[in-house]
Image: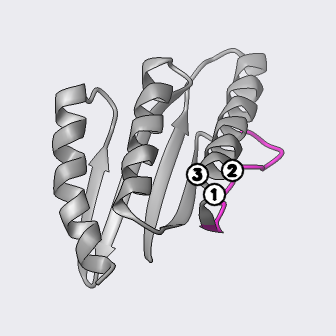
Amino acid sequence: MANVSIRIERNMTAEVQKIKENHLERAKLIHSFVDALDLDVKKWGVTDAERPQEWTGLIIAFGSAGVFSAAVTAFKVWLNRRKISDVKITVKEGKRETQISLRNTTEKNIKSIIRSLRLKINCLYK
């Protein structure tokens, strides 16, 4: 299994009440996502912290490229619905690291990203 680092940023706002709401909404989305895909989370970061944080970093063991593809699709839906502001995904292969950001990413670009990362992720499972 490949451990993939994911950084998820909450929507930014100056309203104090909205900051807490956005933080809690992001945590709820992350837990639903992990449960739905039955993911093995190695590190939760500040997902469930009492004090709102701008971003949280997760380390997840993806069992297949299909699960990774589903994850990227879910993140894109969250971005489109403005539930979060950005997702950064990092895949490490030995000393080499590939990082992508899904902010302002088109559907066409996402398909290309998935195709290129799937090749890299498939290599990790051999």
Q: Which residue is mark 2?
A: 35
| Residue under the point 79% across and 43% down | 51
Question: Which of the image's four quarters has the N terminus?
Answer: bottom left
Label 3 element class: helix
- Between marks 2 and 1, how big is the CA–CA gap? 5 Å
- Between marks 1 and 3, how big is the CA–CA gap? 4 Å
- Between marks 3 and 2, how big is the CA–CA gap? 6 Å
Decide whether residue 85 is among the magenta residues.
no
Q: Which residue is mark 1?
A: 38
**Amino acid found under the numbered disc labelled 1:** Asp
Q: Compared to 122, does 33 lie above or below?
A: above
Q: Which mark is residue 37?
A: 3
Q: Nearer the viewer, residue 36 or 53?
A: 36
Q: Which mark is residue 48?
A: none
Q: Nearer the viewer, residue 50 or 88?
A: 88
| Bounds of the magenta segment | 41-52
Residue 34 in the image, given as x and y percentages of width and height: 63, 51
Is the C-beta separation of discs 3 and 2 under 8 Å? Answer: yes
Is the C-beta separation of discs 2 and 1 under 8 Å? Answer: yes
| Residue under the point 78% across and 18% down | 17
Q: Quadrant of residue 2?
A: bottom left
**Amino acid found under the numbered disc labelled 2:** Asp
Q: Compared to 52, does 46 lie above or below?
A: below
Q: Is 71 left or right of 107, judged from the image as shown?
A: right
Residue 58 in the image, given as x and y percentages of width and height: 56, 59
Is the C-beta separation of discs 1 and 3 under 8 Å? Answer: yes
**Amino acid found under the numbered disc labelled 3:** Leu
Q: Quadrant of residue 103?
A: top left
Label 2 element class: helix
Q: Nearer the viewer, residue 93 or 111?
A: 111
Q: Is 105 left or right of 34, judged from the image as shown?
A: left
Residue 86 in the image, given as x and y percentages of width and height: 43, 35
